[in-house]
């Protein structure tokens, strides 16, 4: 039951992009086509899950016992950067088709604040355990994918729309994100 | 580039022509996430300005020592060190702001504005130019965040810097202090900013 609540909260109620504002850069950057947004979602799911697992273990068994809690930010970002590189190299060897699909998105993920954000937020969960932290990361990446793919589908339709001159480009995208976020606001109080 | 680059222009470009928020759309997560009031926007802006300034200075000083293959991780370590300093200082001296900004303080590390300036400017220019570039970009960021925070606070809670100017039970646009308001307010501010900067230049 507890896990279902975490899932619903992360996907709908506290959607990582639309209500917590994490991962805004890829949200605007790679959402012009549905196909690329699906690729990005896959890459985020992959990296976010592994990153949260590694940073959780590192925090619990190295940083806290050694009293180095204040080095959290530096350690986590280095772990994520190294991990992204490793995932890239391993994927290239082990699964070329998957690498082809996700390859271009992987380097972008290092500076995706959703990954670092979720790794830090997972530490603050109630009665946190490894399983719960990993599940939290998976739930959040599903929330990220949902927001990204909906947004990309709307943007594809926008190409045919007649937009006032001053609103073209950035402003109209921000407005759509705002309306989408308003829709997700409707889920408030669900859990 | 040499010393002959116009320092006044270098400073001003960060505020108007290449404004990090309204024009370049860099560092969007903190921009949208913490600007529910003018004070929070200002606080976040100043924290970012400090990290940007210090990392630009350090990067520009040691740029010749860093092998170009590992420059990005090196920049990230430099940035993360200053973010940790900001984190500890805020927690010790301004706990109220520390709580308000929450997760967005450690996330200054992945603010693309800072890494972007380190990579695109500080690693290629001398100390003076890099410092002024960081100041210009940082001030542009502070101004943008404060304007956005002020707009949302005025519309959403009828106050500015916590000073209320509507009656206690007045109806305000609550929407603007909620998440959707961040996107909508920024959308219209970007339109207005573009109109004004086209007129000026």
Image (cartoon, coloured by chain):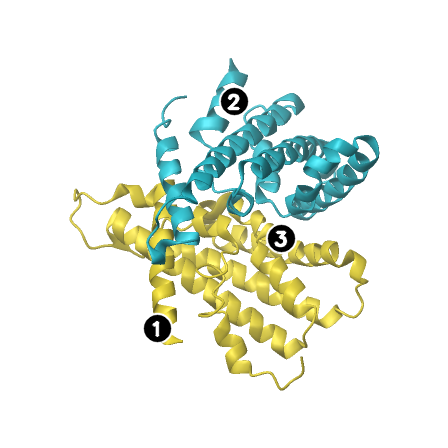
Could you say which chain is coloured cyan in the image?
A: A
For mark 2, what is the residue?
A7
In the picture of the structure, the residue carrying the numbered disc 3 is B84
Residue A164 lies, in percent from the top left, at 32, 54
Q: Is residue B99 above or below residue B118?
A: above
Name the chain letter of the residue that bears numbered label 1: B
Discs 1 and 3 share one subunit: yes
Residue beneath the point at 61% across and 64% down: B117
Marks 1 and 3 in Cβ contact (< 8 Å): no
Q: Is residue B98 visible?
A: no
Asked whether residue A34 is in view, the answer is yes
Of all chains, the one bearing label 2 is A
Tell me the mark number nearer the camera, choosing from 2 and 3: 2
Left or right: where does residue B67 sit relative to residue B145? right
| Number of residues whose C-alpha sits closer than 10 Å to that of mark 1, classed few (under 14), some (14–19) or many (20 or more) | few
* Residue projecting furthest to the right: A93
Residue B151 picture location, percent across and down: 31, 55
**Which of A63/A165 is in front?**
A165
Q: Nearer the viewer, mark 1 or mark 2?
A: 1
Indicate the secondary structure of the residue bearing disc 2: helix
Residue B142 falls left or right of residue A107: left
Quarter in which the C terminus of chain A is drawn: top left
Residue at coordinates 59% horizontally, 59% vertically from top-left? B114
What's the CA distance linking mark 1 and mark 2? 49 Å
The residues bearing labels 1 and 3 have C-alpha atoms spaced at a distance of 41 Å
**Nearer to us in this view, A128 or A93:** A93
- Chain appearing in yellow on the rendered image: B
Residue B148 against residue B140 in the figure, above or below: above
**Can you identify the residue that label 1 sits on?**
B199
Q: Judge whether A67 appears above or below B139 on screen.
A: above
């Amino acid at each position: 039951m507890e896990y279902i609540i975490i899932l619903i909260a992360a996907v709908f109620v506290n959607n990582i992009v639309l209500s917590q504002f994490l991962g805004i850069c890829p949200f605007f950057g790679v959402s012009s086509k549905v196909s690329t947004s699906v690729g990005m979602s896959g890459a985020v799911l992959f990296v976010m899950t592994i990153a949260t697992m590694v940073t959780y273990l590192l925090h619990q068994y190295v940083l806290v016992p050694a009293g180095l809690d204040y080095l959290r930010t530096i350690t986590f970002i280095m772990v994520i950067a190294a991990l992204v590189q490793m995932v890239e190299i391993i994927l290239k060897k082990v699964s070329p088709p998957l690498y082809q699909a996700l390859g271009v998105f992987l380097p972008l993920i290092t500076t995706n604040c959703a990954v670092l954000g979720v790794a830090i937020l997972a530490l603050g969960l109630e009665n946190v355990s490894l399983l719960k932290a990993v599940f939290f990361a998976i739930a959040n990446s599903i929330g990220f994918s949902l927001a990204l793919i909906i947004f990309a589908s709307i943007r594809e339709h926008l190409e045919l729309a007649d937009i006032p001159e001053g609103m073209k480009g950035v402003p109209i995208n921000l407005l759509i994100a705002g309306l989408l976020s308003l829709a997700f606001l409707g889920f408030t109080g669900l859990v | 580039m040499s010393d002959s680059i116009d320092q006044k222009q270098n400073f001003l470009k960060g505020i108007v022509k290449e404004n990090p928020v309204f024009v370049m759309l860099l560092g969007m997560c903190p921009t949208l996430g913490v600007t529910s009031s003018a004070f929070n926007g200002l606080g976040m802006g100043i924290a970012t300005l400090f990290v940007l300034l210090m990392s630009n200075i350090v990067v520009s000083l040691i740029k010749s020592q860093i092998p170009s293959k590992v420059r990005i991780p090196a920049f990230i370590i430099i940035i993360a060190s200053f973010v940790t300093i900001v984190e500890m200082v805020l927690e010790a001296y301004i706990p109220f702001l520390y709580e308000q900004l929450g997760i967005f303080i450690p996330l200054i590390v992945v603010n693309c504005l800072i890494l972007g300036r380190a990579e695109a400017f500080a690693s290629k220019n001398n100390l003076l130019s890099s410092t002024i570039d960081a100041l210009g970009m940082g001030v542009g960021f502070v101004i943008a965040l404060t304007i956005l925070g002020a707009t949302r606070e005025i519309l959403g809670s009828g106050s500015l810097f916590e000073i209320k100017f509507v009656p206690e039970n007045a109806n305000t646009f609550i929407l603007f202090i909620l998440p959707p308001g961040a996107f909508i307010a920024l959308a219209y501010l970007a339109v207005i900013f573009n109109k004004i900067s086209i007129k000026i230049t």
